[in-house]
């Protein structure tokens, strides 16, 4: 049986403590690196954003129908369908409020994230989510303008023309495209965030 001096045993003990300390610190770093509030808000925010994207994309086909009905001078059905889309947009806006709440939670938790690179990626995702919310507000405003224009055309108000309806629908579709784009940017930023965190 090998003989170890007391000094050698103490040295081994110190090394063991250092090694164990390193692994415990590493384990704590992996578990505590990202605040729980950030993780929960991130997951909730991603689900809400995707739902908003899905609902806004559905409106694209409905807007095409509205434009076709307007061109056919079928204003009553165009109005009815527009009111349906606006009701859907109200549901989307209520989800935008929830998304804003989740983004606020992510922002509050940013300072607790240790890695500068991870914080930057998270900040980019947050910025994209905020831009998405801003575009969603524009989307809802344009829908209300569309309803007003169709109501004016239906009532025979002077100055209400086909080109105006088509122009508003084009703007709405532009906002839907922007909503999709900002959601993709947020997703890409969080994917980069994950790569940074997992590489540590």
Image (spheres, rainbow, N blue to C red):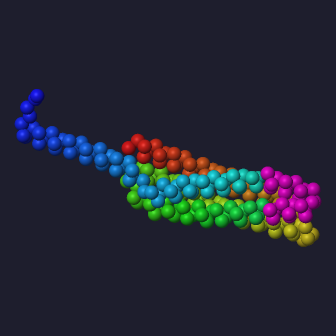
Report the residue at 81% width, 68% height from top. 148
In screen coordinates, is 96 left or right of 142? Answer: left
Report the residue at 54% width, 54% height from top. 43
Residue 3: x %, y % from top left: 8, 32
Magenta-drawn segment: 61-84
Report the residue at 47% width, 48% height from top. 193
Residue nearer the viewer, 26 or 77: 26
Is residue 143 in view?
A: no
Is residue 52 in view?
A: yes
* Res 151 quadrant in image: bottom right
Image quarter of the C terminus:
top left
Report the residue at 81% width, 65% height from top. 83
Residue nearer the viewer, 100 or 39: 39
Image quarter of the N terminus:
top left
Considering the whole magenta stretch, tell me its main secondary structure: helix
- Vertical placement of residue 20 versus 63, above or below: above
Residue lying at the far top in this picture: please name it: 1
- Vertical placement of residue 20 versus 155, above or below: above
Residue 120: in magenta span: no
Residue 197: x %, y % from top left: 42, 46
Residue 2: x %, y % from top left: 10, 29
In screen coordinates, is 95 left or right of 69? Answer: left
* Res 119 quadrant in image: bottom left
Residue lying at the far front in this picture: please name it: 1
Residue 97: x %, y % from top left: 61, 65
Residue nearer the viewer, 193 or 178: 193
């Amino acid at each position: 049986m090998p003989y170890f001096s007391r000094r050698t045993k103490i040295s081994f003990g110190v090394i063991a403590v250092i090694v164990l300390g390193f692994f415990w610190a590493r384990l704590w770093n992996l578990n505590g690196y990202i605040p729980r509030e950030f993780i929960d808000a991130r997951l909730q925010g991603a689900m809400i954003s995707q739902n908003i994207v899905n609902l806004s994309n559905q409106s694209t086909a409905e807007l095409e129908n509205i434009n076709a009905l307007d061109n056919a001078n079928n204003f009553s059905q165009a109005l009815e369908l527009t009111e349906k889309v606006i009701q859907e947009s109200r549901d989307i806006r209520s989800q935008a409020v929830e998304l804003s709440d989740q983004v606020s939670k992510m922002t509050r938790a940013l300072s607790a994230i240790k890695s500068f690179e991870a914080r930057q990626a998270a900040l980019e995702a947050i910025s994209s989510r905020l831009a998405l919310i801003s575009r969603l507000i524009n989307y809802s405003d344009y829908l209300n303008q569309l309803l007003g224009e169709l109501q004016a055309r239906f009532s025979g108000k002077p100055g209400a023309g086909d080109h105006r309806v088509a122009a508003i629908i084009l703007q709405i579709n532009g906002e839907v495209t922007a909503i999709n784009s900002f959601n993709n940017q947020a997703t890409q930023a969080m994917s980069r965030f994950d790569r940074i965190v997992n590489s540590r």
